[in-house]
Image: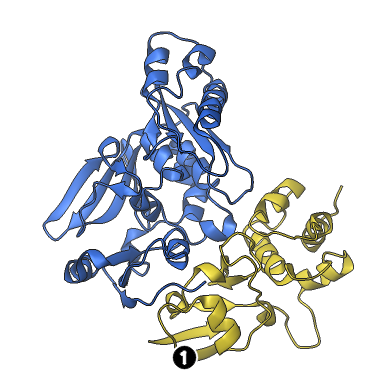
Amino acid sequence: MEISVAVNGTGRVSEVEPRTLLVYYLRDELGLTGTNVGCDTSSCGACTVHVNGESVKSCTMLAVQADGQEVTTIEGLAPSSDELHPMQESFQNNHGLQCGYCTPGMVMAACSLLEENPAPTEQEVREGLEGNLCRCTGYHNIVKAVLACSGQDMS
Amino acid sequence: MIPAAFDYQKANSSEEAIALIVEHGDEAKFLAGGHSLIPMMKLRLAVPSVLVDIAGVEDLSYINDCGDHVAIGALTKHRLLETSDLLLAECPLLAHVASKVGDPQVRHRGTLGGSLAHSDPASDLPAAVLALGGSLIAEGPGGQREIAVADFFTGYFESSLAEDEMLTEVRVPKAPGASWSYQKFNRRAQDWAIVGVAAVEVGGATQVSLVNMGSTPLRAEAVESALAGGASATEAAEAAAEGTDAPTDLNASPEYRDHLARVLTKRALEASGVS
């Protein structure tokens, strides 16, 4: 069926099979491969994108469910191609990534978290990122990066 | 993993949704947030041939003060439950339990009605509503009916909803200032409870329900009657596994679940102020 989705601010009209998952629509149909597939069982959060500004796991949503909605992926976060989003910059400055596989999902989840809670405590950041797994176990610097992006230091 | 092929239909109103379900019969399923159904379809544990997407039925997302109870639209998302000032004031147990479902991404999509209609005995919200003792409104081709939550869960992933009925509203009694607690035991944040226990004081009595201790969410009747008879939290909690039929899986044996039910019930009762 035909769907019309605003992806990173650009209207896209595509023909998809109803069973197509949002993550495969983004990656295979639109070529937006920044969104990773990790566990494929809505556990790891590597596929996190924003739908209407809220974090969702795109492996557990059908592309047809995004019809008429706004989707933002990691590619759509930065204001321009030679600038990083403040959250991306904060991950870089605080060494918030090791292998980088979980990073797009972590950054998207972190932005959604700060949107809902602009000045979270360390505990709230940890709980806010509970849907994202980092198998390098680099959580400490990820939490530090999110706190720094909210204008707070990790005590 | 990609689900098996299905036909997708979008409903814009509950009448349209019910008409589509009537048309397609038991091969069709309602799709709300999809955070229980889509994972099951990916694993081929559910293979509906038609999905009727009801997420766009906007008038089913609300949380209203109705005097003695709070009425919640079936399509209200968990995130709205956990942040609702009305629920935090009038029915804090439900807001808190909603905040313990899955993770933020799941709570941005999952709906209260979807969770209840899915009737997973390991889910948090069915047990919370069962402990509160509310009622559910189902709409079918013949009109509406009210189902007491005590009569709603009939078996493993089965409810008393008829094939052509849609859950439209959940009514929970107000319990402002009441003592309550939800104890969820799991290994990772987004896992289902290995065992969970909800306790809440409604109308002067402590009501207790159990997650993942049988084929449906269960009221811990033995605990409740022990408390009514004057037992202490420690004494009453000893009866938590009575009348249950705990499942076995990779996480836990039935014996271990029985043990968890007793320990978590004691914690839930103590946290609710039962001494």
Residue at image location 66% in from the left, 54% down from the top = A128
Inspect this view and state whether residue B204 appears: no
Describe residue A9's horizontal placement relative to residue A92 as left or right: left
- Chain seen in blue: B
Q: Quadrant of the C terminus of chain B?
A: top right
What residue would you read off at disc 1? A14
Q: Position of residue B131 (x, y in %)?
A: 39, 33
Q: Identify which residue is drawn at 73% across, 46% down.
A: A123
Q: Position of residue B117 (x, y in %)?
A: 33, 52
Chain shown yellow: that is A
Q: A107 or A28: which is nearer to us?
A: A28
B19 to A27, vertically: above or below? above
Determine crowd level at label 1: few under 14, some 14-19, many 20+ residues with C-alpha closer than 10 A.
Answer: some
As drawn, A6 above or below B88: below
SS at mark 1 in the image: strand
Q: Amino acid at mark 1?
A: Ser
Q: Nearer the viewer, residue B185 or B54?
A: B185
> Which residue appears at 63% of the width and 44% of the height?
B187
Judge from the rendering whether residue B27 lies leftward or rightward of residue A124; answer left or right: left
Give the vertical position of B79 relative to A12 (above or below).
above
Q: What residue is at 50 percent from the left and 19 percent from the top?
A: B237
